[in-house]
Amino acid sequence: MARLNYILIVDDDEASNLITRLFLEKADVTDQIHVRMNGVEAVAFIMQHMNALPELILLDINMPLMDGFEFLRRWKANGLTGKSKIVMYTSSGREADIAHAKQYEDVVAYIEKPMSMAKINQLLDAVFGQHRSGS
């Protein structure tokens, strides 16, 4: 199975980030996982790494300073559509949020917290189109 160059997690929940990182490491899908605590930090990180964007972004919706939807608007406004796959990873199960996320073509999945191995497999299905064996 192919491996990702790196994954960017954008979420203000440190405990959730730790759990997500552990599951991603167990799935052995990448050697690099970067974490940013809000959309402002994530946009700055992306702008500094335009020559090597993450293949996958795990994006929370509800964060301080800049929420996930504002990040998506800026992603699109900066001409980055099609450059990375984005998985909305959030505690919000609101139908309005799910519908809003589907408006962005780079959003390949919407996964509710908390993370589990089953949800990692769901995420990998969205990114790779198939389960990784052994995970």
Image (cartoon, rainbow, N blue to C red):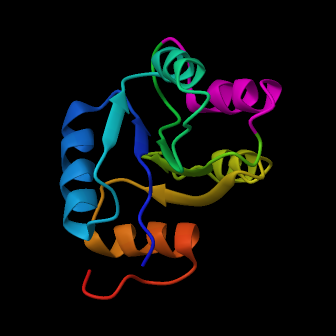
On screen, 48 above or below 29? Answer: above
Q: Nearer the viewer, residue 104 or 27?
A: 27
Q: Position of residue 4 (x, y in %)?
A: 44, 58
The answer to which image quadrant residue 118 occupies is: bottom left
> Is residue 26 part of the magenta span, yes or no?
no
Rendered position, 81 above or below 78: below
x, y percent for residue 60: 47, 38
**Residue in view at x 72 percent, y 23 percent:** 74
Residue at 33% across, 57% down: 30
Residue 124 picture location, percent across and down: 46, 70
Relative to 81, is 54 on the left or the right? Answer: left
Residue 99 appears left or right of 14: right
Location of the N terminus by quadrant is bottom left
**Span shown in magenta:** 65-80
Q: Residue at x 63, y 27 (%)?
A: 71
Viewed as shown, does residue 100 lie left or right of 116?
right
Q: Nearer the viewer, residue 88 or 100?
A: 88
In which quadrant will I find the C terminus? Answer: bottom left
Percent from the top left, x then y, of residue 104? 77, 47
Residue at x 51% of width, y 76% of height:
125
In the orientation shown, which residue stands out farthest toward the front?
Answer: 51
Q: Would you say 47 lies left or right of 101 here?
A: left
